[in-house]
Image: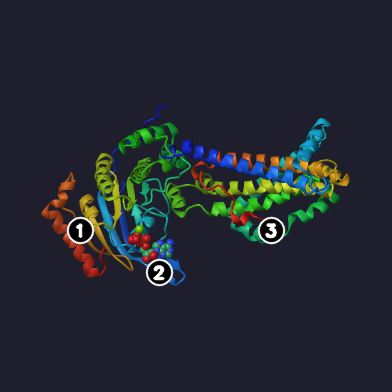
Amino acid sequence: MARADAHAPQQSPDPARGGIRIRGLAVDYQTPQGVLRAVDGVDLDVAPGAFVAILGPSGCGKSTILRVLAGLQRPAAGDAAIGGAAVVGPRRDIGVVFQDPTLLPWKTVFQNVCLPGRIMGLPRAGYEARARELLALVGLGDFAGYYPGQLSGGMRQRVGIARGLLHDPAVLLMDEPFGALDAMTREQMNMEILRIWAATGKTVVFITHSISEAALLSDRIVVLSPRPGRVIEIIENALARPRTMDMMATPEFGRMTGHLRGLFNVAGALE
Amino acid sequence: MSAATPAGRRRWIGATGIASLAIALAFLAAWEFAVGAFAVPSYIVPAPSRILAAFQRGIERQIYWPHLQATIEAMVVGYAIGTSLGIVLGALIAEFRTVERIVYPYIVSLQSLPKIALAPLFVMWFGYGLTSKVVTVALICFFPLVVNTITGLLSAQRDRLDMVRTMTATRWQLFWHVKLPSAAGHIFAGLQVAVVLSLIGALVAEFVGADRGLGNLIQISQGNMDTPGVFAVLVILAVIGMAATGAVRFVHRRVVFWESHRAGPHASDLS
Ligand SMILES: Nc1ncnc2c1ncn2[C@@H]1O[C@H](COP(=O)(O)OP(=O)(O)O)[C@@H](O)[C@H]1O
Ligand SMILES: [Mg+2]
């Protein structure tokens, strides 16, 4: 019991923790039509604690990059490192949130959030206490005993986020986490993820195909072009923090999204 | 949301239940009348009232109990052995490439063999007691479970597997937390099919040769031209079949609660 709060939310003090470095990344998929190069020559650096958006139209390799970072997909060339260590498989300093929250319907909300702790063999009292805190953080403190089938899409995605944070990873990888939500829930979740990011100090890699979502949330925007996925531009986002929904009406925001839209028009891939 | 249906649903089932009962009663009444009106001899088709009388006589003479006991014992023991072995082998085939390569071709070719045809062999090998019946029942229950367990384990969603993989899950953890629950619905569908098959297996084994059992009783009654007696046993068999199927369905709904809709067997199970 003495170690009960060993996994309480905490800032990551170590600057080496959570930095991401990708060099010359290429990923191939075997298809019936032959080898498909989904991603080619991608370089990317993310500072610890930064919020980076990867933006591009559907099919340009965003999920593929995330799968490499999550240790689910082996690159054909190049490499990725997190916190200075090459990614060779799933690891404990990463939390992942997919577009579909992929909760297990046979487990309660609480059991779902606790799953990473169970899988990793962390001390039970510690991760259970942290799961309760995280459920409170995402506004689902009263739903611990519910099953995923009893929740709305937005609530399920919040559970997914709480689960991604359970083991206090230095990096949170999010693949279009709000893509399946209605516009209003999505705006609400955008503000919520910024709040959680500010409260936990994680490095966040946030994949999206929404120009305004990328502009609203991130410090930097990595713009990809399709077939094969390549980085066509990296944009520093100068919008002040904390961000609010009102900022979407500012000229600054309009200039940035206009520029991004222009990039996709040039690349021949409209959103 | 799932709490809203039961009351209304139960009332609806009540109404249809009364309708089915009315149809059954009408059918019995028509049967009774037709047998009398066309003077059908009782040794061809006895009237329901004659069957009831035969049943009462059987109960008074206490002839049913030892036979009932023998049949149910063969069913339960054979079912338990056959389905357990089927689930274990199905899991080994689904999980291990080598096992699949070695064993699966035999499973596929044996599956088309009418297993029931082996019952005479088992009687020759194991005699007229419990063993030959148990072996027949176990063999006939085995295949649907092998096939459904494989199908079920392979049906685990890739996204769910990937998500739990990112938590650094071991192979066993993936099996326990994702694959087995994903397979549960299929396994229970197999268990439901096997219940019916186990009764058939026990009965056929008793026809072929056994010292006791409801199959024997049917043959004894047949030998005495006691058609009402045969029908009385058929009624008992129907009740056993319904009770056993109902019990498995009850457990199915309880265990696989997250798939409470569509619990029926799959078309491929009808071997
Ligand atoms: N498992 C796979 N097998 C074959 N091709 C794939 C696979 N996954 C993705 N692809 C292809 O790779 C490309 C990039 O896919 P993805 O990374 O999912 O893009 P995004 O997430 O940007 O929509 C697409 O053309 C897609 O069809
Ligand atoms: Mg994608």
Q: Quadrant of ligand 2?
A: bottom left
Q: Earlier in the sequence, mark 1 or mark 2?
A: 2
Tell me if the residue at label 2 has its CB under 8 Å from ligand 1.
yes
Residue drawn where x is 79% and y is 39% of the image: B50
Q: Name the residue under label 2.
A: A36
User: Residues at marks 2 and 3, common chain?
Assistant: no
State the CA–CA distance, disc 1 to disc 2: 28 Å
Q: Position of residue B139 (x, y in %)?
A: 72, 50
Residue closest to the far bottom: A33
Q: Quadrant of residue A80?
A: bottom left
Q: Position of residue B140 (x, y in %)?
A: 71, 51
Crowd class of label 2 (few under 14; some 14 to 19; many from 20; radius 10 Å): some
Label 3: which secondary element = helix
In the image shown, does A217 or B82 lie closer to the viewer?
Answer: B82
In the image shown, does B256 or A198 lie closer to the viewer?
Answer: B256
Question: Does the residue at mark 2 contact the one at mark 3 (Cβ under 8 Å)?
Answer: no
Name the mark nearer the viewer: 1 or 3. 3
Under mark 3, the amino acid is Gln
In the image shown, does B141 or A79 lie closer to the viewer?
Answer: B141
Residue drawn where x is 74% and y is 55% of the image: B115
Q: Where is residue B10 in the image (x, y as percent from the top left)?
A: 51, 37
